[in-house]
Image: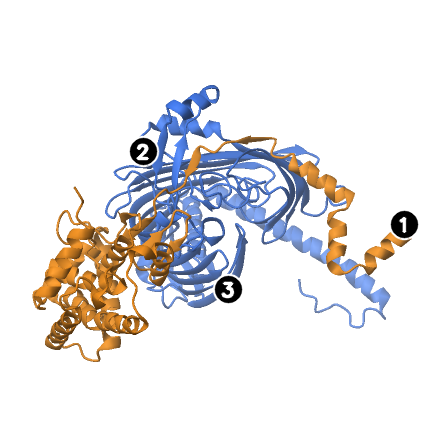
Chain colours: A blue, B orange
Amino acid sequence: MDNDKFPLRAHKNVVETEEFLSNDFEARAKKYKEYEEAAIKLNNLVFDTKDLPFYIHSFQIHGTQKTRRSLFESVIYPALQARTLGSVIDEVRITADKLNRLDIFKHVDVLLDNSNDPFAQPGAIDVILSAEEKSRFWIKTGTEIGNDAGSANISLNVRNVFGGAETLETYMSAGTQTSYVFEFCLAKPINGNPDSKVDISAYRLTRNNQSFSSHDEILQGIALRWRVLSKLGFHELTYGTSWRQICNIASDATLRHIIILFFKKTYAICLILFNQLFIFMNFSIRESAGHSLKSSVTHTLVRDMRDDIMLPSRGYYVKLFQEFAGFNGDVYFAKNEFESQINFPLGKGFILSASLRNGLLFPFKTHQSKISDRFFLGGAQSVRGFKLNGIGPRENKKDSLGGDVYVAAGVSLFTPLPKLTKYPVKGHFFVNGGSLVQINSSRRLAQSIHNLTKTPSVSAGVGVVYRSSILRLEVNFCLPLIATNTDKLKKGLQLGLGFNFW
Amino acid sequence: MQMKNYLSLINMPDQTWRNAINNHPIQQSIRQFLNKFPLKTHRSLYGIRELDVPSLYIWGPGWKSGQETSFDQECVKWQTFLKFGKFEFETKRSNEPLMSPSGKLPFLMLSTDDVLVDDAIEKHVYDSYSENLGSLTNEQEANSQAYIAFADNKLRNALLYYLWCEPANELMTHKKYVGHYAKPLDKVLFHKYKNLAVKELLTRKPVLDKEEIYQEADEALQAISTVLGDTDYFFGSRLPTIIDAVIFSYIHVILNIPLRRVKVPPNLLKYSERIYNDYFLPEF
């Protein structure tokens, strides 16, 4: 809409202005009507002619410098197979969309034209794509908060490294919990498909687990990954090798032998006197120290149908994770994890959310799993009412040792708050709980799984949830209902900051 | 009355003010309420048992099969010293220096859960088991320190050089120190340990001359042999002291590797054999 004729000093010239505006409105309406008619005409034209035989005679691409020909060839190929006008238009649109999503062009414009080639067959179309490449280097900085930890990060990126839409990312992060991360990653789309990427990465990270388990963990590794979008959801297939070091055991971290006592309540005293079923295990932080080399294949499937990641009101989320370790290296296990969440809108701003998670780590060849691979449970984002990793096997009531089998579930009811319905703030009632145990190599697996039901930890509470643009904040008043004597409780107010809540 | 109460609150010093708040009836009832939770407490499946015997975590097993002594000189030294003190302990062949707070083996884990390394072990044994250990005069004490430093310099140089710098011994050293790690990791750690050894050597010798290092070790052994003479323990002591643990550990490891480039004088040979038989062979 050109506004060249808009009268100057409009505030002094009310009559003229009003006249102009009414004329302008009419003119605009007229123009829109014309547009609309033209669009309908074009649409009809295309619809009528969509089955006419047409084909793409030539494909011209303008404005690219670094991008290789082979990338375009693989993206354009399906369009060249189109034999009718309708499919030509569809395929060209899909092609342009793919090129856009490769994230190497600022914009991609498409022009279809009758072929100028005098030797062309009837129905020949020339496609002219004009694109402008994005700048190759970019830097991103950011901060993250979650799982009781904050971090600042910087990533240096190179786009379209070899002209095939490859990206090279160097990522560094320093924080309170994960003390230090360095990652170097080269990714490449397969056949120019933005939904299917292969990447190879090398990383080094230092994790500070002193607060709940008195040790530091240094991880160094390389991984080859294939990420693809299928009808089921987002898949990730990884083969990786990592060298893990458990070190810097805090000097007050103790080393004790832990015994599993199998009690039958009624016979407890008799058992103690006559038939103690002690299982000795060297589970201790100090004895977990050392080097290990894990080489594993993992598969992750995520199907996320929620309307929001942080505070969803409808939809479900399912994640399946499988890992098999033991190709080379000295770590042998099969690991399975399942996570799910479902949300129902109950109307009037009430939302019911339920989640269920479980995991199983089954070590073989070795008689116990390594602490780096075990599951941990508890915390504001996991099971509320307990401290971070506060549930499960514990050494000397201080250090969390992690477990091999866990199950956790939670139900939350989100309610609208009076006078605050406009803001992303909700009231929150919840009940959640979980159980985490170790697998005993000398006993049957069923026995270990049965142990899960013996010592559940459950809590309930009420609070307020706020979803800001970057994270979710929860303040809950928690009451642990059932707990184990070694659990670390968080009675009263508990603060949760992060993205992922269960 | 109310007003007066508040005024007195304001005028209170900080600490008492906080106490007043904490002891407020509402606060107390909240605390009482919270104390009722959890409503039910299970007993953990994982019981805790105290360690009954202190443990010494060492590199092991020894150079020869069936040996209780470690293959590492530092470990042998503390093993021997604890044996001298008739300290009751069990050895654990952890072969993992990351377990130790100092990053080096050995370390001693007491039944009270305290972890001791190096001099703390010596102090602990002297504090509670001194009746089994010899005592030296001040002059002898000074001499003892000097000879320990001498051995830790000359004999340690020869040992480190032999184990880590002789290409012919790489396989043997590798097997003992890093053989238990997974495939490429052993190579990485071998180089790490080797670099540490070389760095340590370079702090004491600017140039690593093989012949010179072994020559000096030979001379050192001669000197130590003269000091020992025909006595049972150093400085004619009736009972062993720390210097006996140090010298025994070097000679024991040199004889067992075996490091043939260094000649052990006959009286030291006999000395080491006797200590081994007295303290490490099981009594019948």
- Callout 3: residue from which chain? A
1 and 2 marks in contact (CB < 8 Å): no
Q: Position of residue A365 (x, y in %)?
A: 25, 38
10 Å crowding of disc 2: few (<14), some (14-19), many (20+)? some
In this rendering, the answer to whether A472 lies above or below B187 is above
- Callout 1: residue from which chain? B
Q: Position of residue A387 (x, y in %)?
A: 55, 44
Q: Which mark lies nearer to you, 3 or 2?
A: 2
Question: On the same chain: label 3 and label 1?
Answer: no
Residue at the disc numbered 2: A441
N-terminal of the pair, mark 3 or mark 2, is 3
The answer to which image quadrant residue B31 occupies is top right
Helix, strand or loop under label 2:
loop
Residue A141 bears which disc, if any? 3
10 Å crowding of disc 3: few (<14), some (14-19), many (20+)? few
Q: Which mark lies nearer to you, 3 or 1?
A: 1
Residue found at the far top of this picture: A266
Q: Cα distance, mark 3 to mark 1?
A: 56 Å
> Which is more toward the observer, A237 or A365?
A365
In this rendering, the answer to whether A234 lies above or below B158 is above
Task: Say left or right for A350 vs B140.
Answer: right
Residue at the disc numbered 1: B2
Task: Say left or right for A124 vs B92.
Answer: right
> Which is more toward the observer, B27 or A63?
B27
Question: On the same chain: label 3 and label 2?
Answer: yes
Residue found at the far right of this picture: B1
Look at label 2 and name its amino acid: Ser
Look at label 1 and name its amino acid: Gln
Q: Cα distance, mark 1 to mark 2?
A: 67 Å
Helix, strand or loop under label 3:
strand
State whether residue A385 appears in this view.
Answer: yes
